[in-house]
Image: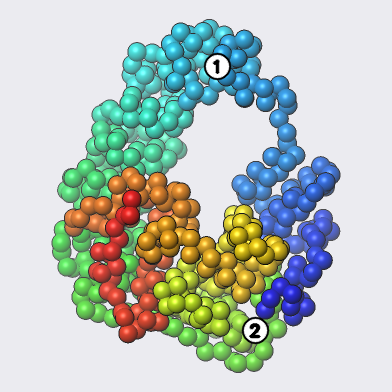
Amino acid sequence: MNFSDANASNTDFLQKDFRVTLEWLEQKPKSYAKDFFILQYLNQENLPFENAKIAYEMGNGTNATLKKVFNEKYNKKAPIDLKCYRATIEQLKQEDSKCIALGLSLQEATQISKKDLEYFISQLDPYPTLKNDLKIIASNDPFSSLIKSDMNRFFRLFFDLGENYRVKFFNKSFSPQLINEIYKDKNFEKFLRYVIYNKKLSNIQKSLFILKDNKTLAPHISFLLGINAINNNNLDVANSFFLDSYKKSYLRTDKDKSLFWLYLVNNDQSFLQELSNSWDNSIYTLYAKELLNLESNNIVYDVKIKNKKSNFDIHDAFKWMEVVSDTKKNLDENKLKKYEEIFSDKNTIPHLAYILERYNKYKTQYFITPYRDIVGKYDIYKQVLIYSIARQESHFIPSSISFSSAQGVMQIMPFLSLDISKKLNEEYNIYEQFIPNKNIKYGSFHLDTLMKQFDNNPLFIAYAYNGGAGYTRTQLKKGLFKEKNKFEPFLSMEMISYSETREYGKKVLANYHIYNNYLNSENKVSLSTIFQSLVSPY
């Protein structure tokens, strides 16, 4: 279906002259989908502030993109404030205390002379918080001054002063008392993310070993501390953390991850045996089965349908969200039969597969290959890549909208689809991205770019698809995927700093392995071979 065939769909926003109105928005339930359409409304030209405010207040209230767009377009800073924000250090010296407080950032304060620092400190009596922050920066021993302050100031300065400053002044051995104080604070997990993913903070990292005796750690924290111990060559401490994570983890996926690392640390095949009994098809369980010469017995490649025309509008995001909500709980056999009647033709195979996975509590996993008329025209590597990513992005649902406004089967962000339309010299309509043919075409175009940048490596392409090419290059340039030892490439996978991208890459890689060996059965590839190919091009 092309957008010009919109009359083949009853979806209102696929009609040629559709525009979002307040009246239309008022009829829609709060959801990611509604937030997406509120964004389209706010992006209209010459929109009165009153109307924009009404639309904005219809949103979920937690959508950062929506908040950003509204504030940028309608909550303008006063000219005096803008002048202070843009002022140089020399210009700020001529201003009053309020302007100094607005214009002087903590990072800027680390780069100016002590003389200038002392001057600003002398002017900031009405702003004691900033004044005392600057006193720590101006001191001869910022670390000693910092740990004598309260925890709020400790975390604010630790986070805000920048990586170079942290490495230069704060990479010390933290006392057990300080580590335990940090642990009790709500900012502890954020602190770990800043510390553990930066190899230059090794003194702080080793100070964290003391937590191995802490019996109250959350399982995901124990796992992260285990990775930290591996990075600092302490296998006994790592084993203690991984074992704690395994025992406490509730989710099967988390248990499997901890089990795999217990196997790597101990080289004990009993951990592999337990992994092989997992119902989840992850890189860890698939690799365990490969090493033990076992096959997965819960992967399904096709879905039986009634083969009668469905009346379900596959483009309507709100209709699909109703289904998602309805199947979260009480998905019994009667409800399943109802959806088997609704999702009855090839266009709704993804929808039925989604319901069946939920019905089976994910213990049967569907690796379907819909849209063969679209995807099948690409070479086999591209087909495998598209299916691997689309399964993870949307479960192949055309009307999917994420909390960040990514759209369609391939979950393409609006800024990206607009850019691709320009490169393809095509007229742009954002709602076309709910049409599989258009969305997959644009997704394929984007993948072409990423394939060139990352040497056709499926894991690095997955990272870039989720976190961006720039972010991925930055991560790889940290030295990841360079070394060869018994913990690689798994340790490098855990050192991707953004958790969503880190886990996304692993899931896409598992999908890639499964889809390749299904669609490209004459050229099957082992996970061992895939792992060996994960070498950074940077």
Task: Identify the element where label 1 is drawn.
Answer: helix
Crowding at mark 1 (Cα within 10 Å: few <14, some 14-19, many 20+): some
Residue 173, position in %: x, y? 25, 29
Q: Residue at x 22, y 52 (%)?
A: 483
Task: Identify the element where label 2 is drawn.
Answer: helix
Colour treatment of the image: rainbow
Q: CB of mark 2 within 8 Å of CB of mark 1?
A: no
Whether residue 184 is visible: no
Instruction: Compare residues 275 and 68 and report the one nearer the observer.
Output: 68
Residue 380, position in %: x, y? 42, 78
> Dividing the image into 4 quarters, which one contains the N terminus?
bottom right
Q: Quadrant of residue 295?
A: bottom left
Q: Residue at x 24, y 56 (%)?
A: 488
Q: Residue at x 42, y 18 (%)?
A: 137
- Left or right of 218 in this view: 73: right
- In the displayed structure, 520 sits above or below 270; it is below
Q: Which mark is residue 18?
A: none
- In the displayed structure, 32 sits above or below 234; it is below
Q: Quadrant of residue 139?
A: top left
Residue identified by numbered label 2: 342
- Disc number lying in front (2 or 1): 1
Residue 3, position in %: x, y? 71, 73
- In the displayed structure, 130 sits above or below 278; it is above
Whether residue 79 is visible: yes
Q: Residue at x 61, y 87 (%)?
A: 345
Q: Which mark is residue 89?
A: 1
Indicate the amino acid at tag 2.
Answer: Ile
Q: Earlier in the sequence, mark 2 or mark 1?
A: 1
Indicate the amino acid at tag 1.
Answer: Ile
